[in-house]
Amino acid sequence: LDPSLKGFGFIVETFNKEKRSVMTKTVHVPGISCGHCVMTIEKELDDLDGVEDVKTEHASKRVTVSWDPEVTDWTVIKDTMKEINFPPAV
C-alpha cells in the first residue's frame, strides 16, 4: 500500500488465490435465444455472493459458472437460473 494513503480509511486484505478452491460447471440452457438472455443470465448470476465468473454463449446455449464453494453452492446458482426463467437442462 502506498504510504501516502495511510489515514484515509483503506483496508488492504491479501490472500493466496492458489489456496482457494473454485468450482466450475458448464450447463446447457435451451432457453437462451438472444443477446438479452445472455446479459440477463450473466448479470443475475454475477450478482450472487461467491460467484467468481460467468460466461454465457448464445450460439451453443451454454453457461459456464465458476464459484467459491465456501460462499455458495451449485443449488443456489441453479435455483437462481430457474427463478429468472433460464433453467439448465437436466
Image (cartoon, helix red, strand yellow):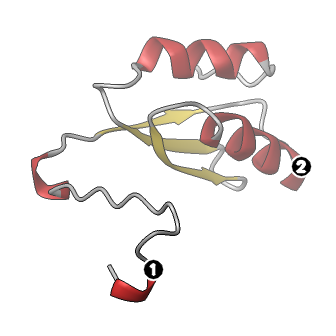
Report whether 64 appears left or right of 89. left
| Identity of the residue drawn at 27% across and 41% down | 22
| Identity of the residue drawn at 50% across and 60% down | 9
* Vertical position of residue 49 compared to residue 60: above or below: above
Q: Nearer the viewer, residue 23 or 56?
A: 23
The amino acid type found where label 2 is placed reads His
> How many numbered callouts?
2
Percent position of residue 79, x then y: 61, 12
* Vertical position of residue 69 compared to residue 82: above or below: below
Percent position of residue 31, x then y: 78, 30
Residue 90 in sight: no
Q: Nearer the viewer, residue 64 or 31?
A: 64
Label 2 or label 1, whichever lies nearer to me, is 1
Outermost residue, front side: 7
| Identity of the residue drawn at 42% across and 87% down | 4
Q: Dot 1 lies on which element?
A: helix
Crowdedness of circle 2 by 10 Å Cα count: few (<14), some, many (20+)? few
Q: Dot 2 lies on which element?
A: helix
Among the two numbered marks 2 and 1 on one chain, the one whose residue lies closer to the N terminus: 1
From the image, tell me which residue sits under label 1.
5
Report whether 43 appears left or right of 33. left
The label number, if any, that marks residue 36 in the structure image: 2
The amino acid type found where label 1 is placed reads Leu
Q: Determine contact: label 2, label 1, CB under 8 Å.
A: no
Question: On the image, which quarter does residue 15 sit in?
Answer: bottom left
Quadrant of the image for the N terminus?
A: bottom left
Q: Nearer the viewer, residue 71 or 9?
A: 9
* Vertical position of residue 34 compared to residue 90: above or below: below
Crowdedness of circle 1 by 10 Å Cα count: few (<14), some, many (20+)? few
